Image: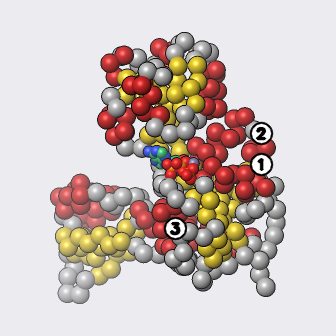
Amino acid sequence: MTKRMRLAIQSKGRLSDGSLELLGKAGVRFSNNRESLWRPAANFDLDLMMVRDDDIPSLVLGGAADYGIVGENVLAELQVDEPRFNELEIVLPLSFASCRLDVAAPDAQGWTQLSDLDGKRIATSYPALTRSAFTDAGIQVDIIEMKGSVEVAPRLGIADAICDLVSSGATLKANNLKSIATLLDSQAVMIRPQTGREDETDNTAETLMHRLGGVMASAQTKYIMLNAPTDRLDDIQALLPGSDAPTIARIAGRDDVVAVQAVCRERVFWETLERLKNAGARAILVLPIEKMMA
Ligand code: ATP
Ligand code: ZN
């Protein structure tokens, strides 16, 4: 019997839906029992371990799970003070749960750079990253550690500024805070121990990683079909975003027009379609790509 791959993911929170959705798109099906610690895949040699995100690096490092999905921010915070966490490596960035760790301060203060915070109190759930950034910049601050709702600290008078995760910026805005600096760019990542404990789950992991890579690649890749006047073909080809050489096919009964088909590895915007049309392209179709394998 093959050993099943154990993947630790967040049980509840911003990472859990994204993780399950990504695995679903990779064709892995799970039981609906959201409350249990383990969720075995029905059609893959994979068991999900449902835990708090902060515990995932330790669980993977300790060998309770083979792989884990966490925000880069969680891993980075642990790595500042505990070198053993450097034994974990990121095997695949997963392109969701993107956010930044930003230093932000009340708009009204007019502070614009880190040095303006010299001698101030900074509230954060990321004390290690915050402390090390200010220390590296040679700026003295007091770190006030908070587990959540960091954005209210200045209003409560317990801190002068904050260092917190930001995605859209709406929370900062709602609290009259303005970003001063970004300490880290983060997204969800797949991690495992670096000293690749080679074992029987490696094949399963490799297959899964390939599929996840394909899911992410196809998410922004589109298939474009259009008709192009033969004498404008070069211009039109140059406008196709991030594509390899397109397929050019004859159209029955026409010498002046050809059919063009291309895989575009970049987002296709309305502006691109308008430019294609202005260059003479007609009957333009943009199709989603469901799966990709090179
Ligand atoms: P748990 O109960 O598992 O400890 P949590 O409260 O620590 O959950 P969430 O708020 O669910 O965690 O966030 C999980 C991850 O989502 C963060 O570590 C971060 O990588 C990512 N994330 C993306 N955008 C944001 C955001 N705007 N605020 C907070 N986290 C974000
Ligand atoms: Zn957490």
Left or right, residue 72 beside residue 241: right
Which residue carries the number 2 mark?
A: 83
CA separation in Å, label 2 and label 1: 8 Å
Nearer-the-camera pick, 176 or 241: 176
Image quarter of the N terminus: bottom right
Left or right, residue 229 beside residue 156: left
Residue sitting farthest toward the bottom: 252
Secondary structure, mark 1, is: helix
Mark 2 residue type: Pro
Secondary structure, mark 3, is: helix
Disc 1 beta carbon < 8 A from ligand 1? no
Mark 3 residue type: Leu
Going from N to C along the chain, the mark reached first, 3 or 2, is: 3
Choose top left, top right, bottom left or bottom right for residue 61. Answer: bottom right
Asked if the residue at tag 2 contacts the one at tag 3, i.e. Cβ–Cβ closer than 8 Å, the answer is no
Q: Residue at x 58, y 24 (%)?
A: 143
Which residue carries the number 1 mark?
A: 87
Nearer-the-camera pick, 117 or 197: 117
Q: Residue at x 29, y 82 (%)?
A: 250
Query: Measured from the top left, where is residue 89 in percent x and y?
Result: 70, 51
Asked if the residue at tag 1 contacts the one at tag 2, i.e. Cβ–Cβ closer than 8 Å, the answer is no
Left or right, residue 16 beside residue 248: right
Which residue carries the number 3 mark?
A: 20
Few, some or many residues within 10 Å of mark 3 (<14, 14–19, 20+): some
